[in-house]
Amino acid sequence: MYHARVRSLCLTFAVLGPLAGACHHLPPYPTPRVTYGAAPIELPLVQLPEDQTRLYVLVETGSMGEQLWFFDTGYSHTTCDAAALAQEGVPTRKTLSTTRGELGKVRLEAATLPDIDLGGHTVHAPRCAVRDLPGTSSIPDGPGYIVTGVLGTNVLRRFIVEVDPAAGVV
């Protein structure tokens, strides 16, 4: 009985896996370990002149300094901009992974970031998908700033998140 169930599941995944969309092309982006600091914190929301519809936050990334990140619970995995990581000397590695985004199918690299600080909570060695964000999505770069990446649910799932746009905080 057990072997029949396992074969049935394997057959189901073999048939349905390719139909599952972009996710089956992604390597695992695990939920990183978090050391929680003091009780609830607020991160100020940042509004970009070129993009008034999205929510951005400033994140302290240790050796990389304070960086601007797009806050999006719809991204299943944290994604980093290739140019921003290159500028900071963060190594990336080639993958066979792809994702589908606003501009079609895109090849991904991967990186492990240094620990980041989200308002006193330390996210240890988060992994991210790496691609040219302004070139492959509608996330802008503008004069005087670079969007380092997108905080995805693999990081955000470690937190209870409340967004208060009227107060300008997450």
Image (cartoon, helix red, strand yellow):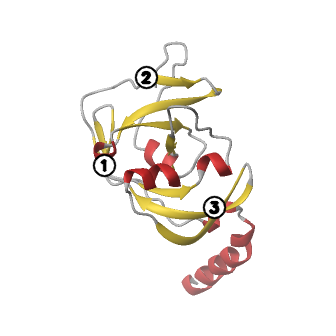
Distance (Cα) linking label 1 and label 2: 20 Å
Residue topped by disc 2: 44
Q: Is residue 81 visible?
A: no
Task: Pinpoint residue 137: horizontal percent, then vertical percent.
Answer: 67, 47
The label nearer to you, 3 versus 1, is 1
Residue 106 lies left or right of residue 129; in this view the side is right
| Amino acid on which disc 2 is placed | Pro
Does the image show residue 91? Answer: yes
Q: Residue at x 29, y 37 (%)?
A: 121
Q: Which mark is residue 8?
A: none
Q: CA distance from mark 3 to mark 2?
A: 31 Å
What residue lies at 52% left-to-right and 36% top-to-bottom? 71
x then y, percent, for residue 84: 47, 48
Q: How many marks?
A: 3
Q: Which mark is residue 115?
A: 1
Q: Position of residue 55 (x, y in %)?
A: 56, 29
What residue sits 56% from the left and 50% below the top?
Answer: 76
Residue in the foreground of this view, choosing between 58 and 167: 58
Q: Nearer the viewer, residue 162 or 149?
A: 149
Q: Which residue is mark 3?
A: 23
Q: Residues within 10 Å of mark 3 (few under 14, many from 20)?
A: some
Q: Earlier in the sequence, mark 1 or mark 2?
A: 2
Crowd tier of the residue under label 2, counting other residues whose Cα lies within 10 Å: few below 14, some 14–19, many 20 or above: some
Q: Is residue 105 left or right of residue 121?
A: right
Residue at the location (49% across, 17% down)?
168
